[in-house]
Structures are given as structure tokens and as C-alpha cells.
Amino acid sequence: MIRLLVTGGTFDKEYDEIGGTLFFKDTHVEEMLRLGRSRLDVAVETVMLIDSLQMTAADRARVAERCRECAETQIVVTHGTDTMVETAAALAAGVPGKTIVLTGAMVPYAFGSSDGLFNLGSALSFAQTLPPGVYIAMNGRHFAWDRVRKNKEAGIFEEI
Amino acid sequence: MIRLLVTGGTFDKEYDEIGGTLFFKDTHVEEMLRLGRSRLDVAVETVMLIDSLQMTAADRARVAERCRECAETQIVVTHGTDTMVETAAALAAGVPGKTIVLTGAMVPYAFGSSDGLFNLGSALSFAQTLPPGVYIAMNGRHFAWDRVRKNKEAGIFEEI
Amino acid sequence: MIRLLVTGGTFDKEYDEIGGTLFFKDTHVEEMLRLGRSRLDVAVETVMLIDSLQMTAADRARVAERCRECAETQIVVTHGTDTMVETAAALAAGVPGKTIVLTGAMVPYAFGSSDGLFNLGSALSFAQTLPPGVYIAMNGRHFAWDRVRKNKEAGIFEEI
Amino acid sequence: MIRLLVTGGTFDKEYDEIGGTLFFKDTHVEEMLRLGRSRLDVAVETVMLIDSLQMTAADRARVAERCRECAETQIVVTHGTDTMVETAAALAAGVPGKTIVLTGAMVPYAFGSSDGLFNLGSALSFAQTLPPGVYIAMNGRHFAWDRVRKNKEAGIFEEI
């Protein structure tokens, strides 16, 4: 079984047609798993639904705690891309012996042209096959938590 | 680098609005890689664009030949689901020493509710991490070529 | 109030992912009205769900009967494009004194690139503003029932 | 021929995946006309691409001027919903003898669940059939410019 921890990020943002702004309502992960005809045994848990620029050290500690406490050793964390690397470092420091894969999206899943479904398929696959450790799965690739940065100008993740 | 061999299947079918039927025009794989913001080095090659029920032994030999001849050792093959298992067996017999992952879709990518993008993300990730061998990546899972069947009633792949 | 009679056609076709064919399940008209944020008072009634090539004289008589019997004088009929002109003629002969607008789609609404939502918005608007008579609303235009043909090669409706 | 004046609004907003914000790039109207298989003779002209909350009296005068100057007597104006009624009043005061229909969208066309295509089909149809005057076409309905308000809480237009 795979544990999927939802933390928010662009992945799950929606358009508020009354206010004309982006906001969080619910995670789209279960709908995405249905669309992907997933037959994996995935336990989806919404830990928080926030923009990753607002994520605090306490928030990261809470994600790490959920990673430690859950029975599963294969974990996917959906996360905003802006501070995904910081959270990956916190999880590497705080959660030994599990395969943790963070992923997200550059465009909200609810909008037409999102990379979210591609990334979710990718992250779930890496979580099943990579050895214990903390990774980021974006752009079809996987990166060890301490070998990656987000290139904010290009909107991609790259090896360092 | 990853070699991606296109053979057709539901994945790439389109709706012909003049005739009201489904047909093949071009592969959507490159568009899907752009949508997924893929930064993988993928060489896309259309070997054929056919319904997998029409795939002959000669067609399978041609796919196997392309797998053997290409320089890459990580290969993804997009394929119709109906005879994906037969082609997997042919590749297992004919292509030693490479990681080959077959994938497809239950619904054409061009239609709204396709599993194609999820499966493509999944297959590319398995191709990067699984040891040499022939696999099918569908429903978020990976199956060894000789341990899988398509359950045609349920429209899913399952272990045997 | 507007009466909306559903008869099927490409408009409402869906993809059967088990059989790989196109079929009818339910009409999408109510979902489309929600998507269009319609605040019109529309009574949706599914008269039949068939391919218009299979529509018989008895089927056309039934549609005409529903047009006559309903209280509304503004009626939209969703219909396959192949025999839309024949049904329009049957309605012109059998339903006096009402504004009846037939519309359809070249691509199923359930697929990404459908003209259905555009045509539905158009047909509902023509039904509110055209004088009594029978019309076809396709390609953004409206045609009197006896001044139109489907150009099957180009997939468009044109004046005769 | 119909003149279609683009002014921006939610209709044409896009998601900037680098900044995570909404912005204007180009109008989607031509793509929408293609999707709707429109065979209308429509002259599309981008007058401005702005949020309607930022529209000034000078901007409105410019739209009115373009309405007066163009040869066409049937005009559709795409516009943000927040100040659509103000612009309608300015056009009613400044452009005699033409049928002008303002429309917009509650959700950007580029996002999946937009009412834009429905509204565009509706507005173009009303422009062909309503007598000279200035109207708003939203929610499947048409309103005379001085008989309508936007209900900002419900996100709909209603008669006054």
C-alpha cells in the first residue's frame, strides 16, 4: 500500500468564479486516481491545503510526523513547487527508512493544460521502485532531495 | 536517453468528425510530453499506428527489431491494450538486456477523460528504475510480461 | 420557458472504454447548461437517444408530437447532423406556430474539442428571438428548414 | 458580417505557470470560433486586453468609437463581467443604430469549466437577430442595457 499525503500547492488550486482568484477547496487527487484508472492501493490523506510559500517549519514537522507514523513505507507527498526542496530536506532529516516522493504541478489540475496527471503517475511509480530515501519527481525525472533545485525562471527542476 | 516507440492503440485514436468514426492521424506523444513538462531526453519514433487487434507477428518482429537496434537501454512502447501482453511476450523472447515498458490507454488521449497522461508518466518512470526485463505499466502498476493478463470485462490489467 | 427535446446524435455520444466503440448513455445537456451557467427556464426531455441515420418516420412523428403537445412555444431539438434536415422538414409539416431550432454537434460533447457547447448557446438564443418556424442552428448560423443542406464532405451546413 | 471587439475580461485570462497568477496574453476568440466550427463572417479586433475593473472612461470611449467607425451593424463585444453594465451604458449613449451584444465569462476559456464557448455562441446569435440596441448576453439570456445588473454574490446577471 502507498500513502499519499496532500499538502496543497498549485496541483489542487481552483478558480473562484465569484472573486476571480485562485483558492483551495478540496484535493483533486482521488479524481485523478480515478481518471488514471489506478488500481493501486492508495491511502489518500489531506494533511493541509496551502500554498507552499506559506508553509512553516511547524507545517513541515507535521508532514514529517505523518510520514513517520503511517504504516506504509512508500509515500507520495503532493506539494507546491516553490518550497518543495525545503520540505524534502525536512523529510530527509526526519523520516528514515522510507521511500518518499514529492511531486506537484506547474498548472492547477482543474485547468486544462496541467502537468498534474503526468506527475502523479510518475511519482506513484517512483515510489514503488526507488530505494528508501527522499526524492522529488517533476518533469518526468526523479531527483535525490539534496541534488535538486527549482529553476524559478524556467519553471523546471534541475540537478545540482 | 529513453527511446519511445509508438505503435498506435487507443492512446492515439482520434474522432473523425466527417465520418463519425475513430481513426489514427498522428501520435499525441510529443504533445503529451510537452503537457507533462517533461525534461527527459526522449527519442520518439512512430513504428506503426494501428489497432493492436490488427497487429501481426511481423509487426511484433518489427517492434522487437527496433528495440534491439536502438542505442537506448530504457524503452517505452505505446500499444493498444487488447494484445499488449502478446507483444510483451514477443519482446521478452527477442530483446535481451533492456528495460522495456509497454503502456497504453483505455480512452483516447484526445478525449477528455483519458488515462493516457497518467500512464505515460508512469511508464517513463518505471523505464528509468526497473531492472532489465519486459513490463506492462497500466493502472499505476507494473507487471512482469509473464505475470499479467488484461481483464477485458473490467478493462484493467491484473497479476496472474 | 423553453422546451429542449433530446434525440441523440453525435452531441451525446460517449466512448465505451471496454468495447472501444461510441455509444449513448445519457444526455449531456443538463451538464452543458450548468457549464454555460444558464439561467434560462429550460425543460429538458429525452425523447430518444439514437444515431440520426437510424431515425425512422415514426421517430420523427414522435418528435413532432412532443413539439405539438408541449406547452412551450420556443423549442430546441438536439439531433444528429446526418438527417437533421429531414427531421426539420417533418417538424415544419407537423408543428405550426412555434419556434423550433434543431442543433447538434460534429464532435461528441464528452470529447475535448466539441462544438456542442457553442451550438447549444446559439440554438437557445435563436429559439428566443426568431419568429415561429423551423430552423437549423449550426456553425453559428441559423437556416430556415427548407433553405439548408448538410455538406457531408466539409462537415458544415450551408444555405441552398 | 459581424464585428467582434475584444476588450479582455475573465474570458481571455490565462494562468502564468511561472508566477502562479492570472494574466492576459492573446485573445482566445479565434480558437473558440474554430472550435465552434463557426462559418460566420466575423472580423475579430482586439481593442484592449484588460480586466474590466481597470477600464476607464477613455477606454469605454475607445470601444464606442470602434463600434461607430466599423462598417458592420452587428457587433459583439467580449468584456469582463464586473463593469459590463457600465460599458453597455456608454455604448448605448454613444453608438446609435447598431445591434451591440456584450458578453464575457465567469471562468477563463483556457480553464476546463468555462462558460465562454456557450456565451460566445449565444452572443453571436443574439447579434444576428435582435433589433438595433445595446444588450448583454450572459447565462443564456439577453438583457437590454438599462434593464440588467450583475449579482456579484451569485455570479449571474439578472433583470432589473
Image (tube, coloured by chain):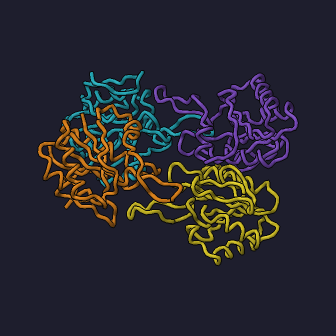
Chain colours: A purple, B yellow, C orange, D cyan
User: Residue C87 appears in which quarter of the rendering?
Assistant: bottom left
Q: Nearer the viewer, residue B157 or B160?
A: B160
Q: Which image quarter holds the C terminus of chain A? A: top right
Q: Nearer the viewer, residue C13 or B108?
A: C13
Residue B145, compared with residue B39, is above or below; it is below
Left/right placement of residue D21 relative to residue C106 reads right
What residue appears at the point 47 percent right and 54 percent down from the top-left corner?
C15
Q: Is residue D42 visible?
A: no
State the image coordinates of residue B45 (x, y, percent, origin top left). Answer: 65, 67
Residue C117, compared with residue B159, is above or below; it is above
User: Residue B59 appears in which quarter of the rendering?
Assistant: bottom right
State the image coordinates of residue B10 (x, y, percent, origin top left). Answer: 55, 60
Q: Nearer the viewer, residue D76 or A140?
A: A140
State the image coordinates of residue A94 (x, y, percent, origin top left). Answer: 85, 30
What residue appears at the point 33 percent right and 47 percent down from the top-left corner?
C119
Left/right placement of residue A155 relative to residue D48 reads right
Q: Is residue A112 visible?
A: yes
What residue appears at the point 70 percent right and 42 percent down from the top-left corner?
A41
Q: Which image quarter holds the N terminus of chain A? A: top right
State the image coordinates of residue A111 (x, y, percent, origin top left). Answer: 54, 40
User: Residue C34 appears in which quarter of the rendering?
Assistant: top left
Left/right placement of residue A122 relative to residue C47 reads right
Residue A92, compared with residue B8, is above or below; it is above
